[in-house]
Image (spheres, helix red, strand yellow):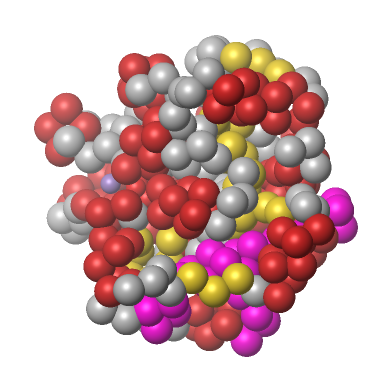
């Protein structure tokens, strides 16, 4: 038995030339944004990576094959598909073994990137500790993955739908470096500010890449979380979002939303309650993360 992994021609060429590659996830396409903005955004993110001198590798499982880099047609069909599995560490192998189709979360994308020898990955926001986790035990597998798989993940922090303070605590317990890019505060996805300091602050892509390499030299497992604040002009303020998030969370409770459905439900509800403004902000921050990730990838 061999691993059914297919590298796109672009990714193969980049690997052969030692050129920078940036991994991109697919759950943001299938579960994070509505069609057709999801496909349009995925294309723009890939273009942003190319414009910044790196090769994009969007990762997904299609009919039992692990694709590292998708064609335009594959991206389009994934973006339109219904009932696609949302894969994390727990169900990734089973999906491949049963020849299924699934979108990769941050955790699964990190695993795939590492298998393909890719060091840097750009996304929107990571999963984290949900509010009320003391009762629900809902803590994203993304945090555990950051602790064990050596990939640098560029995100805009953690969403304010999460308990950000507990998310930072779990990351610290698990030995994950959390690096705010160019500011002291840990950013909160749609907002530049979370009210909480980031454990580390860095100013350059070179420092970030060197820190990851140093971890490997020390034999430390795991990756790094780079928290890149959303561009100021695209930000939604914490004050504006706080009541909207509270409403979305209470609606989720009313409808009995649980487990894997929580994050997609909240994102969709916040999109409705902000008249689409949350999606515009989400697109702007993903593009900005793709840019920074490309600059970091160039340092590896
Ligand atoms: N951030 C976004 N949109 C998303 C997600 C994150 O801007 O759709 C996805 C990522 O794939 C992340 C997942 O890994 O949500 C976290 O889900 P959960 O909370 O169920 O672990
Ligand atoms: Mn969860």
- Does residue 86 show up? yes
**Magenta span includes 69:** yes
Residue drawn at x 17%, y 27% as measured from the top left = 134
- Does residue 236 show up? no
Say if 15 sits above or below 138 in the image: below
Relative to 298, 143 lies left or right: left
Relative to 298, 26 lies left or right: left
Q: Where on the picture, by quarter, is residue 31?
A: bottom left
Relative to 132, 55 lies left or right: right
The boundaries of the magenta stretch are 51-73
Residue drawn at x 39%, y 39% as measured from the top left = 145
Image location (x, y in percent) of residue 41: 66, 65
Image location (x, y in percent) of residue 192: 64, 29
Which quarter of the rendered picture does the N terminus lie within?
A: bottom left
- Residue at the left extreme of this rendering: 135
Q: Where on the picture, by quarter, is residue 88?
A: bottom left
Say if 288 sits above or below 43 in the image: above
Residue drawn at x 86%, y 53% as measured from the top left = 53
Residue drawn at x 32%, y 43% as measured from the top left = 141
Say if 207 sits above or below 101 in the image: above
Image location (x, y in percent) of residue 244: 43, 43
Q: Nearer the viewer, residue 93 or 189?
A: 93
Relative to 242, 279 lies left or right: right
**Magenta span includes 147:** no
Q: Nearer the viewer, residue 207 or 42?
A: 207
């Amino acid at each position: 038995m061999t691993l059914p992994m297919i590298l796109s021609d672009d990714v193969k060429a980049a690997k052969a030339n030692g050129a920078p590659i940036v991994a991109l996830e697919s759950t943001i396409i299938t579960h994070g944004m509505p069609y057709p903005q999801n496909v349009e955004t995925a294309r723009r993110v890939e273009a942003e990576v190319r414009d910044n001198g790196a090769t994009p590798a969007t990762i997904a499982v299609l009919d039992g094959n692990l694709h590292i880099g998708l064609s335009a047609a594959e991206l389009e069909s994934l973006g339109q598909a219904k009932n696609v599995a949302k894969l994390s560490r727990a169900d990734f192998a089973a999906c491949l073994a049963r020849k299924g189709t699934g979108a990769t979360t941050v955790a699964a994308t990190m695993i795939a990137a590492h298998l393909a020898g890719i060091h840097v990955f750009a996304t929107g926001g990571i999963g984290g500790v949900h509010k009320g986790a003391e009762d629900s035990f809902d803590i994203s597998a993304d945090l555990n993955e950051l602790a064990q798989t050596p990939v640098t993940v560029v995100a805009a922090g953690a969403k304010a739908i999460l308990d950000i303070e507990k998310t930072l605590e779990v990351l610290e317990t698990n030995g994950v470096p959390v690096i705010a890019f160019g500011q002291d505060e840990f950013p909160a996805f749609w907002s530049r500010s979370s009210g909480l300091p980031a454990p580390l602050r860095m100013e350059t892509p070179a420092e970030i890449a060197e820190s990851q390499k140093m971890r490997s030299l020390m034999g430390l497992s795991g990756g790094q979380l780079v928290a890149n604040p959303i561009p100021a002009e695209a930000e939604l303020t914490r004050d504006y979002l706080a009541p909207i998030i509270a409403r979305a969370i209470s609606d989720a409770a009313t409808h009995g939303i649980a487990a894997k459905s929580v994050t997609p439900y909240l994102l969709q509800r916040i999109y409705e309650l902000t008249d689409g403004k949350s999606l515009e902000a989400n697109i702007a921050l993903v593009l900005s993360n793709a840019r920074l990730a490309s600059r970091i990838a160039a340092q590896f």
